[in-house]
Image (spheres, grey):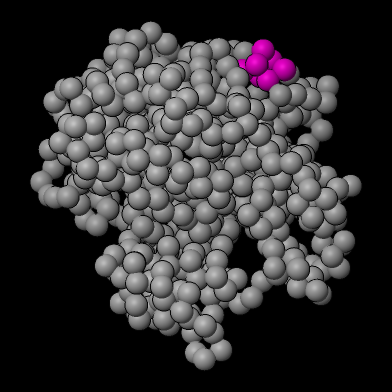
C-alpha cells in the first residue's frame, strides 16, 4: 500500500462513510479520477472505509465496463459501433484509429497515451458516428480526422431539436444549458408552486387525470404508480429519476438534461411532494458526463434559490436530490438493477413482485420515472390536466419526443403530439432519406424494437396506432435504414449489443443472447443453415418467456420481427 498516496482519497471517503455501502460507486469514481484506475491498495482502502467486503468491491469493479483495475492509457477512446453509428461507418473509423496508433482494438498505444475500445451506444445517435475521448464527446467523426479526434479538436456535439409542439423542448437547442433565471422567466417552477398549494393527493389526482404514462417504454400510468407509493407503508419514501438512457438509438433524455436541467428537477420535486418523499436520486449513465455536470450545477442553483432543501418556498416541505453516476452497464436502465447499483452492488435485476412502489430503493416505497416522464409533470401542474390532453389522442394524450437517426437528412429529437404519422416524422421533419437511396425499413422502438416496412409509413405514432401495426413505441426510437445496407449485418449488430450487455443473472438471457449472436453471425456471413429460423425463433421465445427482466424478454424482438418480414434473408424457404 506504500506505493500509493491514499490521503487524497481518504479525505473524500471521510464524507462518504456515513452512507456505507451505498457510497461505493461514488467512491470508485473518485478513486479512478485520482489514480486513473483502481489499484488493489485503493480497492482495499475503499472497502475498509465503507465496510464493504473486498470481494464485493472487486465484484462491482468487474461488473461495470467503465471501471479499470489495471492502468489504461492516459485517455480512453470509446468509439460507438452500435446501430446508428455503424450505419454511418463507425467500424471503419475504429479500424482507422487503431491503425493510426499501431494497436488492436482494446489495446494501448506504445506511448501510453490512448486506449481504444469499442463502445455500446453513447447516446449521440444524431451525430453518428460518435466517440468519447476521455471526458470529451465528439460527433460526425470520420477516418480523415483521426488526429483531430485524438487531439480533442473536434467541436462538442450540439443538440438538434425540432417538432411542431415544443412543450418539453422549448428551452432546448441553444447549445448551452438553460440557467435558473431563464427557466423562471419562461414560467419555470410554476408547476411546483401550484403543486405546493394543493394537497399531495390532489397532485396525484391531477397526474392521473392527465393520462400521462411512462415514456421509457413500459407505458405504466404515472399517477397510479405515484398513488401506490404514497399509500404503501414504510418510511422514508424515495423518488428516483432513471437517467440511464442506454437504448441504442435513444438520446432524448440527454438533450433534456443538458439543455433544460431544471425541468427534470422540478418534476422530481413535485413527485417527492406528492408521495411524501424527503429525498430523490438521479441516476445518470456513466457516458453522460456533460449531463451529470449540468444537472449538478442545476441542483446547486436550485438549492441556493430555495427550490431544493429545507422548507421549499416556505411550504414546510423538505426535499433533497443526490446525483449518482453509472459506470457502463445497460442493464442498470432496468429499474431494480438501478436500485441495486445505487445501493452499491452489481446491477442485477430483482425478481418481481415485490414492485418498487412497495419495496424499491433500500427496500422502501419508491417512485421511479425516466427523464421525459418527469419533464411532463411541471406542465400538468401549471396548466392543468385538460391542457395536457389537448395534444395527442384520447388514448395517448400529450406530446412525445422521438429520436430520429440513421439515414435521414436531419436526425435529431422531434417533439410532436401523439398521433402524427411515421411518414410525417421521416419526410416532413427529418427531410427524407439522406443519400437518395430508397427507404428499406425503419427500426421502431430501439434495439429491443421491431421493423416497419415502407408500406407502413402511414401508421399513427401513438400507443394504440403502433400496437395495431404490431410495432412497439419503446423509448421513441425511429431509425431509418436505406437500401444500401445489409439487414443481416444490422441484426448481427443488435445481437452483439444484447450479448455484450446481458448481466448473466438468468440462464435464458445469458445463454440465449450468446446463441442468437452466434446464429446471426453465421447468417450474416452467408452461411445460414436450414434450421436457423427455427433455432432463432426457439431462442427468442424462450428468452421472452423465461428471462427475469426486460433485457432478455425483448432481446430477440427485432430478430423475430425480421423473420416474419423477410424469412428468405435467413435462408428459409
User: Residue, x 39% and y 67% (percent of image)?
Assistant: 24
Q: Relative to 310, is 543 on the left or the right?
A: right
The location of residue 485, given as percent across then percent down, is: 78, 36
Q: Nearer the viewer, residue 210 or 267?
A: 267
Quarter of the image that includes the C terminus: top right
User: Magenta span: helix, strand or loop, mainly?
Assistant: helix
Estimate the x, y position of residue 135 in percent, counting from the top left: 63, 54
Question: Residue 517 appears in which quarter of the rendering?
Answer: bottom right
Q: Is residue 429 magenta?
A: yes
Q: Nearer the viewer, residue 38 or 153?
A: 153
Rendered position, 552 above or below 139:
below
- Quick check: 560 left or right of 240? right
Q: Position of residue 80 (x, y in %)?
A: 68, 50
Task: Give the camera-side residue of 458 and 349.
Answer: 349
Query: Quick check: is 370 in the magenta stretch?
Result: no
- Count of labels in the image: 0
Tell which residue pokes out farthest to the left in this image.
233
Whether residue 502 appears in this view of the structure is: no
Compared to residue 303, the image places residue 331 above or below, namely below
Res 290 visible? yes
Percent x, y of residue 117: 69, 61
**Furthest-bottom residue in view?**
2
Q: Give the side of residue 49 with respect to residue 104, left or right.
A: left
Image point (64%, 40%), residue name:
124
What residue is rendered at 28% in x and 26% in y? 192
Q: Which residues fall within the magenta stretch?
A: 425-431
Amino acid at each position: 500500500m506504500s506505493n500509493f498516496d491514499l490521503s487524497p482519497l481518504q479525505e473524500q471517503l471521510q464524507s462518504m462513510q456515513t452512507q456505507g455501502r451505498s457510497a461505493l460507486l461514488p467512491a470508485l469514481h473518485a478513486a479512478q479520477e485520482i489514480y486513473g484506475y483502481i489499484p488493489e491498495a485503493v480497492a482495499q482502502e475503499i472497502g475498509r472505509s465503507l465496510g464493504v467486503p473486498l470481494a464485493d468491491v472487486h465484484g462491482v469493479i468487474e461488473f461495470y465496463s467503465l471501471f479499470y483495475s489495471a492502468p489504461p492509457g492516459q485517455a480512453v477512446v470509446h468509439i460507438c459501433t452500435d446501430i446508428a453509428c455503424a450505419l454511418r461507418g463507425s467500424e471503419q473509423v475504429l479500424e482507422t484509429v487503431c491503425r493510426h496508433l499501431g494497436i488492436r482494438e482494446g489495446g494501448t498505444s506504445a506511448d501510453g497515451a490512448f486506449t481504444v475500445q469499442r463502445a455500446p451506444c453513447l447516446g449521440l445517435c444524431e451525430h453518428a458516428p460518435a466517440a468519447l475521448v476521455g471526458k470529451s464527446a465528439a460527433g460526425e467523426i470520420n477516418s480523415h480526422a483521426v488526429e483531430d479526434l485524438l487531439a480533442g479538436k473536434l467541436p462538442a456535439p450540439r443538440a438538434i431539436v425540432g417538432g411542431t409542439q415544443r412543450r418539453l423542448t422549448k428551452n432546448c437547442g441553444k447549445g448551452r444549458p438553460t440557467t435558473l433565471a431563464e427557466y423562471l422567466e419562461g414560467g419555470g417552477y410554476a408547476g411546483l408552486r401550484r403543486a405546493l398549494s394543493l394537497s399531495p393527493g390532489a397532485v396525484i389526482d391531477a397526474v392521473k387525470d392527465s393520462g400521462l404514462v411512462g415514456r421509457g417504454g413500459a407505458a405504466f400510468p404515472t399517477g397510479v404508480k405515484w398513488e401506490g407509493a404514497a399509500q404503501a407503508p414504510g418510511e422514508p419514501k424515495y423518488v428516483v429519476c432513471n437517467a440511464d438512457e442506454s437504448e441504442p438509438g435513444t438520446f432524448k433524455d440527454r438533450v433534456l438534461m443538458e439543455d433544460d436541467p431544471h425541468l427534470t428537477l422540478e418534476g422530481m420535486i413535485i413527485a417527492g411532494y406528492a408521495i411524501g418523499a424527503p429525498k430523490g436520486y438521479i441516476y445518470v449513465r456513466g457516458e453522460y458526463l456533460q449531463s451529470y455536470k449540468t444537472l449538478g450545477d442545476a441542483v446547486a442553483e436550485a438549492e441556493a434559490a430555495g427550490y431544493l432543501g429545507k422548507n421549499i418556498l416556505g411550504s414546510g416541505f423538505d426535499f433533497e436530490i443526490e446525483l449518482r453516476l453509472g459506470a457502463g452497464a445497460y442493464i442498470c436502465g432496468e429499474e431494480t438493477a438501478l436500485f441495486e447499483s445505487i445501493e452499491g452492488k452489481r446491477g442485477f435485476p430483482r425478481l418481481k413482485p415485490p414492485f418498487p412502489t412497495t419495496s424499491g430503493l433500500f427496500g422502501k416505497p419508491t417512485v421511479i420515472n425516466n427523464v421525459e416522464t418527469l419533464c411532463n409533470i411541471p406542465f400538468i401542474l401549471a396548466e392543468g390536466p385538460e391542457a395536457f390532453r389537448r395534444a395527442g389522442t384520447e388514448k395517448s394524450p400529450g406530446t412525445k419526443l422521438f429520436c430520429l437517426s440513421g439515414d435521414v437528412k436531419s436526425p435529431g429529437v422531434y417533439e410532436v403530439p401523439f398521433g402524427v404519422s411515421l411518414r410525417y416524422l421521416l419526410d416532413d421533419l427529418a427531410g427524407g432519406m439522406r443519400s437518395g437511396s430508397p427507404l428499406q425499413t425503419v427500426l421502431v422502438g430501439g434495439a429491443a424494437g421491431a421493423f416497419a416496412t415502407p408500406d407502413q409509413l402511414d401508421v399513427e405514432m401513438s400507443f394504440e396506432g403502433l400496437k395495431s401495426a404490431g410495432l412497439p413505441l419503446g423509448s421513441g426510437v425511429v431509425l431509418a435504414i436505406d437500401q444500401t445496407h445489409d439487414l443481416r449485418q444490422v441484426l448481427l449488430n443488435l445481437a452483439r449489443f444484447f450479448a455484450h450487455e446481458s448481466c448473466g443473472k438468468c440462464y435464458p438471457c445469458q445463454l440465449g443472447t450468446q446463441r442468437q449472436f452466434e446464429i446471426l453471425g453465421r447468417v450474416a456471413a452467408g452461411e445460414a443453415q436450414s434450421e436457423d429460423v427455427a433455432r432463432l425463433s426457439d431462442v427468442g421465445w424462450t428468452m421472452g418467456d423465461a428471462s427475469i427482466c426486460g433485457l432478455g424478454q425483448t432481446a430477440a424482438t427485432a430478430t423475430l420481427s425480421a423473420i416474419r418480414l423477410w424469412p428468405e434473408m435467413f435462408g428459409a424457404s
